[in-house]
Amino acid sequence: MSTQKIIQANCATSTKTSRLDITFDESTGLILKVEDASRNQDTVDYFYDDDCLLFAGMGDIHIHAREDVSQKNTYKEDFKTTCCAAINGGVVHVADMPNNPIPPVDDESYLSKFKLTENIRVPILLYAGIGPATRPLTFSVPYKVYMGPSIGELFFKDNESLDEVLVHYKKQWVSFHCEDPIILEENKTQPTHETRRPVSAEIMATDVALKLIKKYDLKGKLCHYSAGEGLKAIIASKKSGVNVTCEVTPQHLYYSLEKLAKKSEREQKFFQMNPPIRHESDRLALINAINEGHIDYLATDHAPHSQEEKEKGMSGLPGLDTYGAFVTWLILDQNIDTKTVAKIVSEGPGIFFNQFLPDLNKKSSIFKKWGKGFGFLEEGYSASFSILNLHSPMKIELSHLKTKAAWSPFLGETFPGRVENVFLSGKKM
């Protein structure tokens, strides 16, 4: 029995949207051939009509899966439920942040956490943490630095200490949580979350991060960006040749302080995150930056907390379950070109993930089965596909969610489409 299969669909890449026949091998999980569609419906194995749009498997490169060797936070989420939520949202690979009770900051702690991911269906790339006394690992991984206090203890209290450590990380991939620690300290007694973490803290930290990226020739990434005014410095740095990319989250693109003001005080607690939801002008600036090609990744910052923890003021929102449905909102309600969408949900995340495959292949054989990696509808890449139905509106309800957190910032909201199907490594999920 042949293990070769053919899927026919309207397909979106960063260069075009066209109808394609994609031949792949179920046994290897890799794409064998991509051609303009020419077959009849009854001669292909999987057929999707014009209601649907196929992307190379979507990736979320900024999540908090909560599992580490301590197992202290698995009541919030674990790697298994993370993968269930990811597939549910049309996501086929993720990258997990290091602010765990036992953070991965050296070879030993990183590999100990890495072992926990080996039997998980969805590939999980792990960030290593950078703290006041850390040094780079002996193999290639992405790093995360918290410039100011967030969730966990892995952060810097001033920019001078950060500078002294980053000198050891020259040319590494370093992602920055941009909030200036001094400004956060000065505003810690302000009455609301957004005034305790003002936009000035993000803008100041952005300037510092961009200077450090240039100074130490880093491959820099700015996480979950929210400040419209700060985009100017990012765009200018990109144009000047600084190697920097930028994430935005669904929640910063969808919500604003003005929209949240219509919700009850209790409901507003559930939207607390770092950095905070900003004003409508910031939201519109982020949407515009996507349209103009200045944003590189749509990343959820998936941060599951229990409802009881949110009631007490814990920062962070879950987002994996609603990733694909939200993408339909970008396409249909915000009129963002599908080529641009393919760049930020598939190709950008794929490029980020794929660059670490050579070193990770040496650590575990599980990474070899992904071929050239994710994000591209090309021969040799993983036969992983995210298929969205653009003509089937979806109201987000509790029954749709797979995350342990059992809530979503989008509960009650209706998106214009939904995830139709997901293929992971040649297998329909």
Image: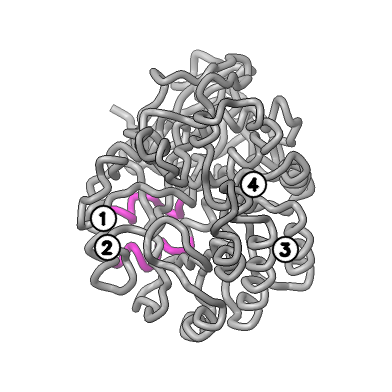
- 176 or 329: nearer the eye? 176
What residue sits 42% from the left and 72% below the top? 130
State if disc 3 and disc 2 touch (CB < 8 Å). Answer: no
Q: Say left or right for 29 vs 165.
A: left
Q: Residue 343 got which mark?
A: 4
Residue 384 lies in quadrant: top left
Residue marked by disc 3? 234
Q: In the rendered image, which quarter is residue 364 located in? A: bottom left
> Looking at numbered disc 4 in the image, what kind of residue is underneath it?
Lys
Q: Nearer the viewer, mark 4 or mark 1?
A: 1
Nearer-N-terminus badge (4/3): 3
Q: Nearer the viewer, residue 262 or 428?
A: 262
Question: Which amino acid type corresponds to the residue marked 3 in the rendered image?
Answer: Ile
Q: Which residue is mark 2?
A: 102
Q: Are marks 4 and 3 in contact (CB under 8 Å)?
A: no
Residue at x-position 57% and y-position 30%:
54
Q: Earlier in the sequence, mark 3 or mark 1?
A: 1
Q: Quadrant of the N terminus?
A: top left
Q: Which mark is residue 68?
A: 1
Between disc 2 and disc 4, whose residue precedes?
2
Is there CB contact under 8 Å for labels 2 and 1?
Answer: yes
Give me the C-alpha separation between circle 2 and circle 1: 7 Å
Q: Residue at x 59, y 54 (%)?
A: 190
- Can you tell which quarter of the image residue 341 is in? top right
Spot occupied by residue 68 in the image (x, y as percentages of width and height): 26, 55
The way the protein has been coloured in the rendering is one colour
Q: Is residue 212 magenta?
A: no
Label 2 vs label 3: CA separation?
33 Å
User: For residue 296, which numbered disc appears in the image?
Assistant: none
How far apart marks 2 and 4 lie (CA) works out to 34 Å
Near mark 1 (Cα within 10 A), the count class, few <14, some 14-19 or many ≥20, is: many
- Image height of 64 relative to 364, above or below: above
